[in-house]
Amino acid sequence: MYNLARSLLFRFDPETSHGLALNALDALHRVGGVQRVYGKPVNDPVELMGLRFSNRVGLAAGLDKNADHLDALGALGFGFVEVGTVTPKAQPGNPKPRLFRLAGHDAIINRFGFNNKGVEHLVAQVKKRHYGGVVGVNIGKNLTTSVENALDDYLLCLDAVHSVADYIAVNISSPNTPGLRTLQFGEQLDELLGPIRSRSQVLDAELGRKVPLLVKIAPDMSEEEVALVAGSIARNALDGVIATNTTVSREAVKSDPQSEEAGGLSGKPVFEASNRVIRLLRAQLPTLPIIGVGGIDSGEAASAKIAAGADLVQLYSGLIYQGPGLVKTCAEALKQQ
């Protein structure tokens, strides 16, 4: 069934297809048809970071930037859904076209640039949710905010989303906001994560519950750089890490005519790069919860992420190429482990 839908959707430009697919899913959800088509969610509960996940398969940030489709996406059987990346103020993102399919490689390049409706809109949407699973909120900085003042934006988002999020992910690894990835290293990372951790602890005390704080990192790091990031994560007592975001490398897709488009590459070519970072993190941080993301397109690929050291996994590009049935396929594979 999805092969037919995909052939139709792929006749449109990628960003149009993205919107059409989400609107169609919303319509199916409104008539109660999502579970009739895709089946009941896989029940494979796991406790992590003080949260109960109904299964270990989640939706990565970026697909639903504004939480406008949260209930419909959750109905596909995800154990958790991460929305965002959200910024304090609404912003249009980069000029179109900014999304490209590399179908011969089951890959996508995007340079959206944190296009979103702003944190107030996202908070209002999350408050209205009926989806009962874990909801993470991925936060970032506005394009017009300098890297030197990035902390201000992260704190504004943290304050706004803390009461509605089950966990919060600090995105410092998108390649589409100039200078953002420089925050991943050395003193800059400590200077960012330290105040965010301190503020989150104050908010936790005010709310009377702990909202786990995670950081999302890039795959394009040396072993030494991963060790530096791991050290900062440990020093600042973060609750987990998401590994990884998209890559700027084009080595695996050089033959594709669109390979030189600017932006982050996701999908199958990122699979091994993200697994490498997961293994390095696990060696450095033996007990830290890790969410593995990058190139999962089958139950076997999801299982390989867990074998590399991840505790949970997230999907994005694989959904575009394999369809929503991938959620159940991956969740069932992990349940068998």
Image: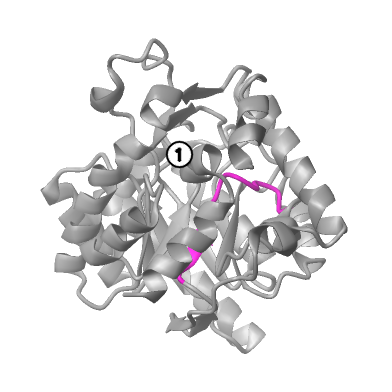
Q: Amino acid at mark 1?
A: Val
Q: Quadrant of the C terminus?
A: bottom left
* Residue at the spot 78% in from the left edge and 67% down from the top edge: 127
| The stretch drawn in magenta includes residue 66 | yes
Q: Quadrant of the N terminus?
A: top right
| Colour logic | one colour
Disc 1, SS: helix
For the point 58% across and 50% down, the residue is 153
Q: Is residue 195 visible?
A: no
Is 20 on the left-hand or right-hand side of 97? Answer: right
Q: Which residues are magenta?
A: 56-67
Q: Which residue is painted at 21% across and 43% down in the image?
A: 221
Instruction: State whether residue 30 is above or below residue 135.
Output: above
282 in relation to 320, above or below: below
Residue 320 coordinates in the image, percent (x, y): 54, 39
**Residue toward you, 98 or 26:** 26
User: Extreme right residue here?
Assistant: 31
Q: Is residue 218 above or below residue 162?
A: above
Q: Is residue 115 toward the left or the right of residue 243 in the image?
A: right
Q: Residue 135: x and y, percent?
A: 61, 67
Which residue is identified by label 1?
Answer: 147
- Quadrant position of residue 336: bottom left
The quarter of the picture where residue 309 lies is bottom left
| Numbered disc total | 1
| Of the pair 160 and 281, the residue shown nearer to us | 281
Camera-nearest residue between 297 and 260: 297
User: Crowding at label 1, few (<14), some or many (≥20) Cα neighbours within 10 Å?
Assistant: many
Q: Is residue 181 left or right of residue 169?
A: left
Is the magenta region chiefly helix, strand or loop? loop
Q: Residue furthest top?
A: 257
